Image (spheres, rainbow, N blue to C red):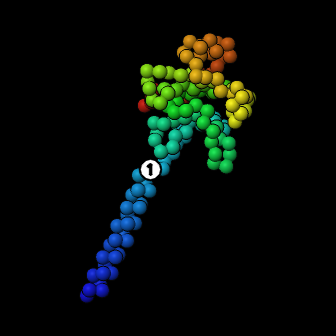
Amino acid sequence: MVDMLRFSTARARRGATLLLCLALGSCGLFDSGTPWRDGRYALLWIDLPDDVGLDYDVGSGGWTTLVDVRVFAVGSDARYIVAKQHPKGDRSITNYFIIDKRLDPNRPASGAVMGPLTAREFEVKQRDLQLPPFTKVLASLE
């Protein structure tokens, strides 16, 4: 009888451990998401859905961050990607970025990423370069 109790207790512990592991594994501790993608460019978050950055896929599962978190709007055409960001989630500040897809984003000296720009600077560039509109807006981060 004592052996049966030990067996039941050990089995119950293993079952509880298994349930705990399953619960932790499915609760999103190591989640990620891609709410927008254009070729090798993507809005990407890891662990926290609010921490969205604009990243470039370098292959083999590696990414280079082009615009740090909190990117809340993007748009693209054949040549450019435009992005709006609230740096570190500060909604009182809006930075604008322009990525030239013809240039290598892995080389900072290439000039592939322009920004951060103010709204006024961006408006001038938008007219001069005929930039695309913002077509993807993450309303919860806006």
Say if 27 sits above or below 142 in the image: below
Q: Quadrant of the N terminus?
A: bottom left
> Is residue 10 rendered to the left or right of residue 45?
left
Across and down, in percent, residue 33 comes to: 52, 43
Quarter of image, res 81: top right
Residue at point 47% right, 21% down? 93
Considering every residue shown, the one lying at the far left of the view is: 1
Across and down, in percent, residue 5 comes to: 27, 81
Q: Amino acid at mark 1?
A: Leu
Across and down, in percent, residue 2 comes to: 26, 86
Q: Which residue is mark 1?
A: 29
Asked whether the viewer can see residue 79, the reply is no
Considering every residue shown, the one lying at the far front of the view is: 109
Q: Give the mark count.
A: 1
Asked whether the viewer can see residue 111, the reply is yes
- Crowd band around label 1 with a 10 angstrom C-alpha radius: few (<14), some (14–19), many (20+): few
